[in-house]
Image: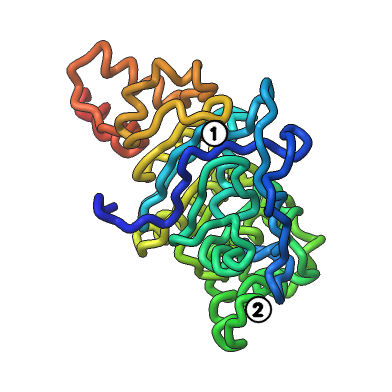
């Protein structure tokens, strides 16, 4: 990732309170719908603008509070935190599914609170939800994967090429003609990813995309994301599995709707003493890496990858 990269998404002092938790809508703010907008998978879904900005009621605990964050072009950013820390709420601001109660959010320079910008934003930032049932709309696998590109107005031939590539990457090409209701939970998660990949947006946001996958499925999906990242795609991934962030460029830790820490991945692991406070569980490999760093002079990798740790330990033999 280049340090002078352009900004893809930017939040400036963003506070968000879910409807019913705030008081009084800001004058002039009304929900809107982008002309021609439709619901569907991959991030164009639902062109209805969220409730307009409101003022925060005293004593209310916002889902996000004073968040300032910049997502740079071409980077792979990991959003970390325990349940209820605000990760999913923040992610939904990145493609205008939610708009700030207070503060500003822009995507590719477009303010997310302007209804006229929503279609363009969701055509540039596709999203994979934590529950795939929330975005599968097609009755047949390939039809569902094609839904997003169709709503972008992509030519039919190009849609066919994108769908085939996306289903192949997600490991579902052999099931392209199958009804979506016959898929397992993990396969539905893969289909949600395929729908987002078929849109071929410059930015991809994933909310715990491996939650319903087995270990092999997780590895395969992470390999796909690595390839996309190496190809220049901007990726924002939400996860509670620290072993899934080892190839990310940067991490942001959220605690109770606020950014508790942000920095490089090697820097994150040097703060492992704070993991419990942040609601993060250190996998066994990280615990071993930490103990070896404290008790030996063994040259260990900056980031505790399995291959790096294996090479270091083999030097003891």
Q: Examine the image and state in which quarter residue 290 appears.
A: top left
For mark 1, does the 10 Å Cα neighbourhood hold few (<14), some (14 to 19), or many (20 or more) residues? some
Q: Could you tell me which secondary element the residue under label 2 belongs to?
A: helix
Q: Nearer the viewer, residue 292 or 15?
A: 15
Q: CA distance from mark 1 to mark 2?
A: 33 Å
In the visual, does 23 lie left or right of 7? right
Q: Nearer the viewer, residue 226 or 84?
A: 84
Image quarter where the C terminus lies is top left
Q: Is residue 67 visible?
A: yes
For mark 2, does the 10 Å Cα neighbourhood hold few (<14), some (14 to 19), or many (20 or more) residues? some
Residue at left offset 77%, top offset 65%: 137
The residue to which callout 1 is attached is 240
Q: Position of residue 148 (x, y in %)?
A: 64, 71
Residue at left offset 26%, top offset 32%: 302
In the rendered view, tell whether residue 55 sits above or below residue 206: above
Q: Could you tell me which secondary element the residue under label 1 belongs to?
A: loop
Q: Position of residue 289 (x, y in %)?
A: 33, 23
The residue to which callout 2 is attached is 150
Dot 1 or dot 2: first in sequence order is: 2
């Amino acid at each position: 990732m280049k340090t002078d990269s352009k900004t893809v998404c930017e939040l400036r002092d963003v506070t968000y309170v879910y409807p019913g938790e705030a008081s009084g809508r800001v004058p002039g703010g009304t929900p809107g719908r982008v002309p021609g907008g439709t619901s569907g998978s991959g991030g164009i879904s639902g062109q209805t603008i969220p409730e307009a900005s409101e003022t925060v009621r005293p004593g209310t605990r916002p889902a996000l509070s004073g968040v300032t964050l910049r997502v740079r072009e071409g980077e792979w950013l990991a959003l970390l935190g325990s349940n209820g820390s605000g990760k999913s709420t923040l992610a939904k601001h990145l493609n205008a599914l939610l708009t700030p109660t207070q503060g500003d959010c822009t995507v590719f320079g477009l303010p997310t609170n302007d209804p006229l910008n929503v279609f363009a934003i969701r055509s540039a930032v596709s999203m994979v939800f934590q529950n795939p049932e929330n975005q599968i709309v097609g009755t047949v696998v390939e039809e569902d994967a094609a839904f997003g590109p169709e709503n972008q107005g992509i030519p039919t031939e190009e849609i066919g090429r994108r769908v085939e590539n996306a289903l192949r990457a997600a490991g579902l090409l052999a099931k392209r003609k199958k009804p979506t209701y016959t898929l397992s939970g993990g396969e539905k998660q893969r289909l949600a990813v395929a729908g987002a990949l078929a849109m071929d947006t410059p930015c991809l946001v994933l909310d715990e995309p491996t939650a319903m996958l087995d270990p092999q499925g997780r590895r395969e999906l992470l390999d796909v994301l690595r390839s996309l990242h190496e190809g220049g795609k901007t990726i924002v991934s939400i996860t509670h599995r620290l072993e899934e962030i080892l190839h990310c460029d940067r991490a942001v830790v959220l605690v109770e709707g606020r950014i508790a820490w942000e920095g490089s991945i090697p820097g994150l692991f040097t703060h492992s003493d704070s993991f419990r406070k942040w609601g993060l569980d250190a996998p066994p490999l990280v615990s071993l890496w930490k103990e070896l760093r404290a008790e030996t002079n063994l040259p260990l990798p900056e980031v505790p990858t399995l291959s790096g740790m294996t090479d270091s330990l083999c030097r003891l033999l």
